[in-house]
Each structure stands twice: as C-alpha cells, then as structure tokens.
Image (spheres, rainbow, N blue to C red):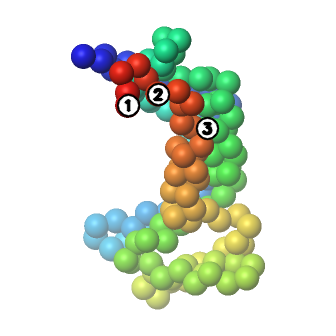
Amino acid sequence: MSRSFSIEVAKDYFNFASAHFLIFADGKREPLHGHNYQVSVALEGELDHAGVLLDFISFKPLVKRICDALDHRTLIQTESPALTVRDRPHELEVRYRTQKLILPKRRCNSAAAGEHEHRTARGAYRRADPPSGAP
C-alpha cells in the first residue's frame, strides 16, 4: 500500500498585491480596495523513485509566475451572476445594479483568467516519472 506525503511551500517572494470588491449577502457592494497577499502552496502525493515529492527547481518559478500575473491587478469575479462585465478593447466595464466601474484592461485579472493561470501551472507541473507502483 502506498503512503501519501504532504508538504507546504512558502517563500517570501510568493506574494502579490491586488484590488477587489465583494458583494455581500444583503446586496451591498463594498468599495474597491486592495490587499497584500502572501501565498503558500500545500501539496500531497506519493514519492517518486528518488524519494522526492516535489521538484522545487521547476515548481517555484510556476508559483512565482502566478503571483506576478496577479500583482498590482484588479480581481473581478466575471462568473458572478450579480455582475455584468463588458470586455472592451482597452477596458472592462463592470456593472452591479445601477453602479458602473470602468477599469483599464491591462490592470485587471478576471476570476476566469486566474483559473486559467491555475490550470496552466497545474498542467505544467507534472512529475516526469510516476510514483512507484503507478501504472
């Protein structure tokens, strides 16, 4: 029976600063504001033939790339049924009820774009050799 191992990776340079807003259950929208985020990644799996769970040399740049893509961006929940988002050539128009925000497109990351980055990194980080006992 294979054993599962876990590791959490945190680095000072796994960070980003982004703006966002929330829509609360009572229907109020909070003002656009920002946060500084520190990122850590928890992984679980089996050890490879060399007894390693994670190849740090290839993994750390992937996490850093995702952080860099989110840094100094406005995060927009494009899949929210409460929002209407119009994608224009140089800007995003975000509407909530009677409120309208116009944001420069180069400074926005939609939730969909963030998920794309996540899928891209997840797809890019695949161990070259399967764990022992894997088909």
Q: Position of residue 29 (x, y in %)?
A: 43, 70
Q: Which mark is residue 63?
A: 3
Residue 17 visible (yes or no): no
Numbered marks: total? 3
Q: Badge 3, how many Cα within 10 Å: few under 14, some, many 20+? A: many
Q: CA distance from mark 1 to mark 3?
A: 28 Å
Q: Which label was assigned to residue 135?
A: 1
Residue at 34 percent of width and 65 percent of height: 24
Left of 44 or right of it: where is 25?
left
Residue 35 - label: none
Q: Position of residue 102 (x, y in %)?
A: 64, 79
Question: Is residue 88 in view from this perspective?
Answer: yes
Label 1 with label 2: CB-CB less than 8 Å: yes
Q: Residue furthest top?
A: 51
x and y, in percent, of residue 120 in the image: 58, 51
The residue under the point 36% across, 21% down is: 133
